[in-house]
C-alpha cells in the first residue's frame, strides 16, 4: 500500500474520530484512568482489549486528549490488504502528516496484521503505544511471548449501570436517592439496562446494533479468524450457549448434543467465544484443584443485550438475567479495580447452590445469591439454606441476597443476611 493511500485513510479516520468527540456525548468511564496513563510514562505498551463496540477507541483517545498522537484503525476495509512490511509505511505516514515529534501512537485492532508484535516491540523503545483489539489471545497472549512484563493489559467492558445513568443524566448520590421520582427513574432504567445491555451505541441506535455486533463477532472474529469449517454447527453452539446463560455446561454433553466427535473441538469452540469476549465461564469452588477443573462450569454472556437478541426470553428469565448482570459486574470490578478477586460458584452434593463465591488471596470474603424475589417461602428457604451451608463450609459470614426490589436485613440460623435490590447493589456495593 503506498504512502498517499495510507495518509488518506489516516486523515479520514482522524476526521471521523474528531467529529465523534466533538458532537457525541462522551461520558467519563469509571475505571482507573490514572493507572492506565501511568503505564505509559515508561517505554511500555498499554493493551486495551475487550468486546467489539465497547468503547476501546474512544477510551484510548480520551486518555491522550492532551497529547499529540497518531491514530490508525486497522479494522477498515481499505486496509484489508495491508501486510507486515506496510507497518513501517504507516509510521512514515504519521511523520509526514504530524512531524517527527509524535510521542504517542494508537493502533486500533492491530491484531489483524501479521507480524505486528515485533513491530510494536521495536517501537515501544522510543514511543508510548496504545494497542486495542477485540481478541484476548491474539493481543495479550501473543504479545507476552515478545515482551517480558513491559506492557499493561486492560480489559474494557461495555457500560456499567452507573455509566448508563450518567449517559442518561440521572444522578444517584445520597441526596438524589431521597427523591421518589429519581428512584423510580433509576428502577425504570434498570429494566432497560437488562434489555439493551451496556453497549454505548445501543442507547443511540437501539437493539439493531446489538445484532450487528453479535454477527461481526461470530463471522469476523471467530469463523474467519479460526477458519472453522462447520460454520452451521458453530453458529448453533454459540446460540445454545448464549441462550443457556447462568447454567452449568459440560463439554462432553455439548459434544453429544451437537454431534461433534472430539470434545477438544468443543473446548476450542468455547475458547474462541471466550477469547472474543462473547461469553465467559465461572468455575465451581473447590479446595481441591483437580475437582475444580473437572466440575461443570457456569456460563455467562458478556452483555444481556445479546441474550435478549439470541434467546428472546426476557420476561421468563428475569432472575437469570439479574444473575448474568451481577456476573458481568463482578468481572468488571475484578478487571478495573481488584485483580486479586477470584469469582466462583458453590454447589454441594445435595444440590444446594450459591451463585457467587468471592475470594481474595486465601480468604472467602463474600457469598452472593441472586433471586428475583423472596415472597415465596419455599424460594426464600432454599436460598437461605444454601447460603448457610456454604457459609459454614467456607468460613464466610458476609452473606448477601440480591433481589429485584427488596431491601432489609434478616437473621437466619444465627447469621445475618443482607437483602439488597439489584439497582442499589450495582450502584453502591
Image: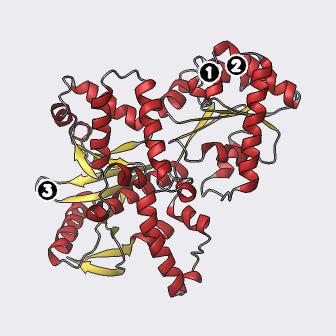
Residue 419 position by quadrant: bottom left
Q: Secondary structure at mark 2?
A: helix
363 to 116, vertically: above or below: below
Can residue 180 be seen at all in this image of the molecule? yes
Mark carried by residue 351: 3
Q: How many marks?
A: 3
Which one is in front, 19 or 294?
Answer: 19
Quarter assignment of residue 348: bottom left
- Give the image location of residue 202, x and y in percent: 52, 55
The answer to whether residue 32 is left or right of residue 239 is: right
Along the line of sight, the residue nearer the viewer: 168 or 140: 168
Q: Earlier in the sequence, mark 2 or mark 1?
A: 2
The residue labelled by disc 1 is: 116
| Disc assigned to residue 223 | none
Residue at the disc numbered 2: 87
Q: Nearer the viewer, residue 11 or 296?
A: 11
Looking at the image, tell me whether mark 1 or mark 3 is earlier in sequence order: 1
Which residue is drawn at the image coordinates 81% and 43% (left, top)?
67
Q: CA distance from mark 2 to mark 1?
A: 8 Å
Spatial CA distance of label 1 from label 3 is: 49 Å
Question: Does 108 appear above or below 325?
Answer: above
Q: Position of residue 310 (x, y in %)?
A: 34, 48
* Residue sitting at x 27%, y 25%: 265
Neighbour tally class for label 3: few under 14, some 14-19, many 20 plus, Cα within 10 Å: few
Give the mark, 3 or 2, whose residue is nearer the N terminus. 2
Residue visible at 24% across and 65% down in the picture:
387
Spatial separation of the CA atoms under disc 3 and disc 2: 56 Å
* CB-based contact (under 8 Å), mark 2 and mark 1: yes
Q: Where is residue 384 drawn, in percent x and y?
A: 22, 70
Amino acid at each position: 500500500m503506498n504512502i498517499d493511500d495510507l495518509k488518506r485513510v489516516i486523515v479520514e479516520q482522524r476526521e471521523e474520530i474528531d467529529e465523534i468527540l466533538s458532537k457525541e456525548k462522551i461520558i467519563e468511564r469509571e475505571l482507573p484512568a490514572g493507572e492506565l496513563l501511568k503505564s505509559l510514562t515508561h517505554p511500555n505498551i498499554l493493551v486495551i482489549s475487550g468486546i467489539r463496540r465497547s468503547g476501546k477507541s474512544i477510551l484510548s483517545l480520551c486518555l491522550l486528549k492532551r497529547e499529540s498522537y497518531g491514530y490508525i484503525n486497522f479494522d477498515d476495509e481499505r486496509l484489508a490488504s495491508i501486510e507486515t512490511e506496510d507497518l513501517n509505511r504507516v509510521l512514515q505516514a504519521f511523520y509526514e502528516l504530524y512531524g517527527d515529534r509524535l510521542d504517542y501512537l494508537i493502533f486500533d485492532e492491530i491484531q489483524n496484521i501479521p507480524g505486528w508484535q515485533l513491530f510494536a516491540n521495536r517501537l515501544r523503545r522510543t514511543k508510548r503505544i496504545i494497542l486495542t483489539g477485540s481478541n484476548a489471545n491474539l493481543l495479550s497472549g501473543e504479545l507476552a511471548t515478545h515482551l517480558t512484563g513491559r506492557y499493561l493489559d486492560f480489559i474494557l467492558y461495555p457500560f456499567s449501570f452507573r455509566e448508563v445513568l450518567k449517559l442518561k443524566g440521572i444522578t444517584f448520590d445520597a441526596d438524589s436517592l431521597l427523591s421518589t421520582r429519581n428512584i423510580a427513574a433509576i428502577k425504570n432504567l434498570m429494566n432497560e439496562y437488562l434489555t439493551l445491555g451496556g453497549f454505548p451505541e445501543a442507547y443511540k441506535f437501539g437493539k439493531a446494533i446489538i445484532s450487528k455486533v453479535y454477527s461481526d463477532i461470530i463471522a469476523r472474529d471467530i469463523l474467519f479468524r479460526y477458519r472453522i469449517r462447520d460454520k452451521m454447527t458453530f453458529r448453533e453452539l454459540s446460540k445454545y450457549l448464549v441462550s443457556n446463560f447462568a447454567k452449568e455446561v459440560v463439554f462432553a454433553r455439548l459434544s453429544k448434543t451437537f454431534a461433534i466427535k472430539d470434545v477438544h473441538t468443543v473446548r476450542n469452540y468455547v475458547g474462541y467465544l471466550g477469547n472474543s469476549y462473547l461469553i465467559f465461564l465461572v468455575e465451581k469452588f473447590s479446595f481441591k484443584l483437580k475437582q475444580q477443573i473437572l466440575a461443570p462450569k457456569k456460563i455467562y454472556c458478556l452483555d444481556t443485550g445479546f441474550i435478549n437478541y439470541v434467546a428472546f426470553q426476557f420476561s421468563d428469565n428475569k432472575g437469570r438475567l439479574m444473575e448474568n448482570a451481577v456476573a458481568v459486574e463482578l468481572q468488571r470490578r475484578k478487571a478495573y479495580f481488584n485483580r486479586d478477586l477470584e469469582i466462583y460458584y458453590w454447589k454441594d452434593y445435595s444440590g444446594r447452590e450459591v451463585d457467587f463465591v468471592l475470594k481474595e488471596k486465601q480468604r472467602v470474603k463474600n457469598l452472593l445469591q441472586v433471586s428475583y424475589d423472596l415472597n415465596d417461602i419455599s424460594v426464600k428457604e432454599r436460598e437461605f439454606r444454601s447460603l448457610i451451608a456454604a457459609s459454614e463450609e467456607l468460613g464466610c459470614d458476609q452473606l448477601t441476597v440480591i433481589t429485584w426490589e427488596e431491601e432489609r436485613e434478616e437473621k437466619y440460623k444465627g447469621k445475618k443476611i443482607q437483602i439488597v435490590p439489584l439497582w442499589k447493589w450495582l450502584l453502591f456495593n
